[in-house]
Amino acid sequence: MKFRSRWLGVASASALVAASLVTGAMGAQASTPSTGPALTYQPSHAGGTVKLLASSAGGTLDPQVNYTLQYWQLYQATYDGLVSFRKVSGKASFDIVPDLAVALPKVTNGGKTYTFVLRKGIKFSNGQTVTVKDVQASFQRLFKVANPNAGSWYAGIVGASACLAKPATCTLTGGVVVNPSKNIVTINLTAPDAEFLDQLAVPFGSILPASTPGHDMGTTPIPGTGAYMFKSDNPNTKLVMVRNPYFKVWNAAAQPQGYPKEIDEIFSNTVESEVTMVENGQANWMFDPIPSDRLAELSNKYASQLHVNTLTSTWYIAMNVNIAPFNNLLAREAVNYAFDKNAAVKLYGGTKLASPTCQILPPGFPGYQPFCAFQKGTGSTYSGPDLAKAKALVKKSGTAGMSVGVVAQTDTVDLALGQYLQSVLNSIGYKATLKPLSPNIQFNYIQNTNNKVQISETQWYQDYPAASDFLKILLSCSQFHPGSDNSINISGFCNKSLDAQMNQAETLMLTNPTKGNALWAQIDKQIMTKYAPWVPEFNPKLIDFISKGTGNYQFSKQFYMLVDQLWVK
Amino acid sequence: MIALGVLILILLSVIVAPFYAHDIAHTNPFTSNLNGTTVISGRTVPVLQPNTQGLGLGVTPIGPTWDFRHYFLGADNQGRDVFARLLYGGRNSLFIGTVSAIICCGVAAVLGMLAGYFGGVIDWVLSRIFDIVWAFPVYLLAISLSVVLLTSGLNLGPVHVGPGSLWLPIVIIAAVYVPYVARPVRGLTMSLREREFIQAAIGSGASDWRILTKEVLPNTLPSVIVFFPLMVAFNMLTESALSFLSIGVQPPAASWGTIINDGLGLLYTRPWVALAPGIMIVITAVSLNILGDGVRDAFDPKAKLRGAV
Amino acid sequence: MSFATRAGVVRAVDGLSMSVGRGETVGIVGESGSGKSVSMYSILGLLRGPNVSIEGRVRFNGQDILGRPDRELRALRGKDIAMIFQDPMTALTPVYTVGWQIAEQIRQHTDLTKRQAHQRAIDLLAEVAIPDPSRRVNQYPHEFSGGMRQRAMIAMALSCEPSLLIADEPTTALDVTTQAQILELLAELQERRGSSIVLITHDMGVISEVADRVVVMYAGRPAEIGTRQEVIREARHPYTWGLLGAVPRLDSKRARLVTIPGNPISPLDVPPGCAFAPRCTYRHDRCSDRPPMRGTDHLDACWLDDAEKEQRRAEIEEAS
Amino acid sequence: MLGFIIRRLISAILVMFSISVLVFLIFFATPGVDPAARIAGRSASPAIIAQVRHAFGLDRPLPIRWALMMDHLFIKQDLSSYVNIGSRVVPQITQAAPVTLSLVAGAAVIWMVIGVTGGVIAAANRGKFIDPVIMFIGIAAVSVPAYWLGEVVNLITQGGLHHSIFAWVPPSGYVPITQSPGQWALHLIMPWLTLAALYAGIYARVLRAELVNALNEDYVRTARAKGLSERRILIRHALRCSLIPIVSLFGLDFGALIGGAALLTEVVFGLPGVGLLTYTSLQNLDLPVIMGAVMYGAFFVVLANAVVDIAYAFLDPRVRIA
């Protein structure tokens, strides 16, 4: 998942939950964690307006189209799916709980049939009652509006191929079957899918009124069922959310009551002014990362208003293994030896904000086994660069003197990393140039092989804590599409035997997660030590800066800060 | 006179940039120095200083030492010596300003003379092109071209200009200002064409080429020369604006505009990184403008060039 | 009076002493740059700027007006002393109607209302024989022909009934017929109102028609002063002879005009002696000293003795 | 007059047509920008991309795509962004325009007042001490990069001094005048001053030169001979005539600024105006928005040219007849 750009992937229940679901699918009913923790509501804090700041809007407001973290953070309070992620702080925020459905679905037919019972009496923010027809229409609409993942996640629903071919007349016959009299929705898949519930719990799975037009609604708000509803959206000034007058709590774990009377997200601020405004209490929170030169000031003066959260994410340099000079393993190793990860950490904001890493999987991840291959020392933790060795390797590889184009984003940190990388490449014998591109473009640009990008700065934030989310998504043959802007395997790394191991690991995860994760650890190590398609830089943390007097900061690992839970009164 | 003196001083200082960097400050202003150290009053300190207070977040480059031997104006976020970069940056800023002014004035003089002398279709086509460029606010045009060319590079037939090349901003800046000089030249040429000596030359059967080079050019040249210093100032300001938007000179090369951009992230903690290059731009532009006024008084007291800035 | 310029101090007018009687017309004549206009401007304080310095005395109606504060001079200008300028094309502000500009002057010096001033402007335009004055009054200067503009200038100058009218080459920019009309108009108005006129011109022909007395100037210095009769019939200064020779006369039998050799000198390098000496056919050793104005009523600044002047003049007349 | 308007209109349409084609071609010649893939989203299947491509008309030949874009921009007015999907271009521009207008109009008042006063004072006192001082300040103002000045203003008002003398300066951003006129002005005062500095410098210098020329004109001598006060001569005669070129200059500058040339000031002060919109869309290579913003900008430049021509006729009676 990309943090800043428009790309966002699904967050799934933990691998363990997924495994148990599939086990349950083999006959038994899934265990129902709906009685787990939920936020307790304190009415005395209700009221006021929460002001959120962002440098720019996040695109269309249509929850079945928008794919940004920025708006997903708001959808958690405005839309509901049949199921949802638990709205709490901490690890439990990855739990899946029933939302518009009475309970988690009954999974039958070998994991291919999901049966949901829809809650009665829930109303949309326009006053209409939610019916099974709305559920059916919402699934059809995924195809009509060309949902980004309609062709992948939802392609497994029976009837999806017809919908993909002719979206306008999508019916999903046999795929989504409803029984209005019993209020039951049955979804049939063509094959078992361990992650299907996660895919329903994200905003794409939002249930919208059946009358919603079958095209991207853009800035026109669509009625939802959450505690809040969108009132107006102006991508150049602000987005306004107000209380949904028809909302009543049915499951606080899935859709809790919110505190503020109104939530505004104000756009078009410079990041510097966002900091100033939060400092001065003119706004409650800023979406954008804090600029590095303000970090020291904030951490000294506003320590109590800063929340540092661990993220499972890796910032890395992707080297294109298919074109010179980095089609040469020695050249890739050389860059790994030369690039000082500690220096990169400094550029990100220091050791409190990031830690250097030599591998693909981030710490604390399933399958994470620390190792460090290319460095001065020999331990499993990073000790420093070995420039002499790097220079020798470049010489040996015969690639010395080649021109190398570094592609980085124009935001401060990425650009600084790009400049540093350029400097490193020059110092080991290449002729490096830097090409900074707008964050909106760079991520696609570096993916497309037509652009012949040799080396680029990028980063990956977890979709869900499963090793496959890093290793398979970013480094398997199936994710490499030459000539396409959507080729997330930026290095173009494709190794058939490793692919086979990944598939094996994935299957193992269903039956024996421990063994599966051990295999993932091995894959992680093999890719880096044998092929070195990346230079892993560091694992960053996320800082939220809230204004003085803003209370009840809750950090969901899925949706990040829960904006509707903030106290401004 | 003072203006000329100041310009020469600035020119000299940017010329000695390599000497300063190499022999006085012992620094390479184009290489990141994230783990570097320097000695301040006997103590070795890191160039990038980790924050030790509060939550300990953030790393700040050292500020000005006011000591010419090292980090006179402090370091930027890559740990590079800002003063050394300032001198090198001046080279690029002045180079781009001057070369693009030469190209711009040259092209504009040629086009203006052709349009004014031949009239007819040539004039119509050229004038419409000028109109179109004119209708595009200068900065918008320059930014559009920069964004696009930075993505693709510039291919002019056999000539390929890479995305990182200094020639990219030079060509762009020269191009956008052409109408500003070409229009007056065209007008002047048109009025010259009516004058007796040109009519006489035409009557005597001299070739167009000969008339243009021997008769028209010497008479239009003074007004083009009058534009020149002002053009250099404009172009330098435009270059700095493009670089400030990070679509001008590309790193690690520096110009005063890129250093201001580098300093932006450090504005509140290390303001000198952004202040110093700005002050240099102002001093240089003021000198050029004063010099331009002087040149105008000397050559052509009636000429008027308006800032498109 | 003198100007400080980049090339040094310029004495634009030097040693001029003259008087204008009531109802009299005095002509000042000389080539361009001879200091005719400048001397008149300096009287009225029209020359300003830190580089200008004026020494001497100017008396108007018995009062010394030179060096008076501008505010007092302003009350005089346009009211008691009015001026008409050479080029009527540029002498009117292009963005205001002719009537507005006349009314402006009236309102500056009288208490008339806007409406009254406007009516007065129409009357004045009629007086200077502009046809259809009530329409013309609302037109802009560029809508007037040259002669009409000059008439409008005269109307403006006369608006406050000045006792002295200084006309600075009023006819130079006009064609011959119009010239005559304007001169006639001036003479007529003078007769009717009895004001004094100083007429600045480089045209001896104009002088011979209207002036009572004549001042001939060269290089900022008076060369000859006398009545019209004296200066034209009995000119004593070689420069005046030259000027007279430069007048094309229809009755003359001579084949070509007698012109003054050389060009008028730059005020920057006036020689220490006689200013005209470098161009003078009759120059001799005395000319290295500056000649004083000599004579009683008919004055001249030439070192030649009277007899010789008489003889030379006769020779010239003979030749022509 | 009618002929004049028609000629103007034709030339304006020609210029805008050329610009639209130019922008269109430049951006479709740029590699690495496939709007379809960006619209479809990550891991979109080829079928989805094809669907998007077809829906947006991206599979048609370039001239048709150009015509489609013009149709959506000008006739249907429903052209939407490639980046902020669903966000329509026309409303984006109509929402950004008031911001730019507020910025430019306020700055224009300031720069005209300062520029004209400065120019008049300098011209009235030419040769004295104050004249070169004003002219030097003018040159300095012309030589300061606007964006840098803006940053320095930010540094001063938002930095160390924000907690003392500049506590009243709000953080950057824009408050609509309809929401709170006081806050509107307060938020814009620093941007106004920053933008006005450059133009005040230019106008003071140009006006002084014009005034000095005018003061040497014959009509000024006439006015003096009429016994008018120096003040009246300067203001009613010399200034009135010198203002004609100034007003035409003003029209062109104002048009260009409204059209997006105030971009740097908008960027530095985070004002969501047309300049900022254009700049962001350029950075994102968001062709529909670029197209809309550039067309809008060009329209104002062309309009300003026409208005200036007409204003000339009103200000200068010599032109009125001809």
Image: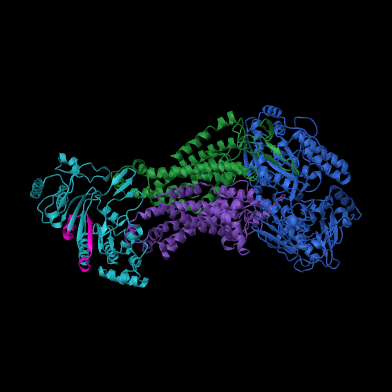
Chain colours: A blue, B green, C cyan, D purple
Q: Is residue A92 above or below residue C278?
A: below
For residue A278, side relative to residue A44 (left or right): left
Q: Is residue C313 left or right of residue B104?
A: left
Viewer can see residue C163: yes
> Residue sitting at 9 percent across and 53 percent down?
C253
Q: How many marks?
A: 0
For the point 85% across and 44% down, which residue is it?
A507
Q: Magenta part of the protein: which range?
A: C190-212
Q: Nearer the viewer, residue B214 or A250?
A: A250
**Is residue C204 one of those drawn in magenta?**
yes
Q: Position of residue A302 (x, y in %)?
A: 73, 49
Residue B179 seen in the figure: no
- Residue A54 point in image, percent of width and height: 68, 54
Query: Horizontal placement of B6 versus C147: left or right?
Result: right
Q: Which residue is painted at 55% across and 49% down in the image? A: D146
In-image side of C177 versus C98 (left or right): left
Residue A75 is one of the magenta-drawn residues: no
Q: Name, please, the residue furthest toward the right.
A: A28
The one nearer the camera, B17 or C38, is C38
Considering depth in this image, is A10 or C278 the residue closer to the camera? C278
Q: Position of residue C140 (x, y in %)?
A: 34, 65
Residue A123 coordinates in the image, percent (x, y): 79, 67
Which is more toward the observer, C251 or D157? D157
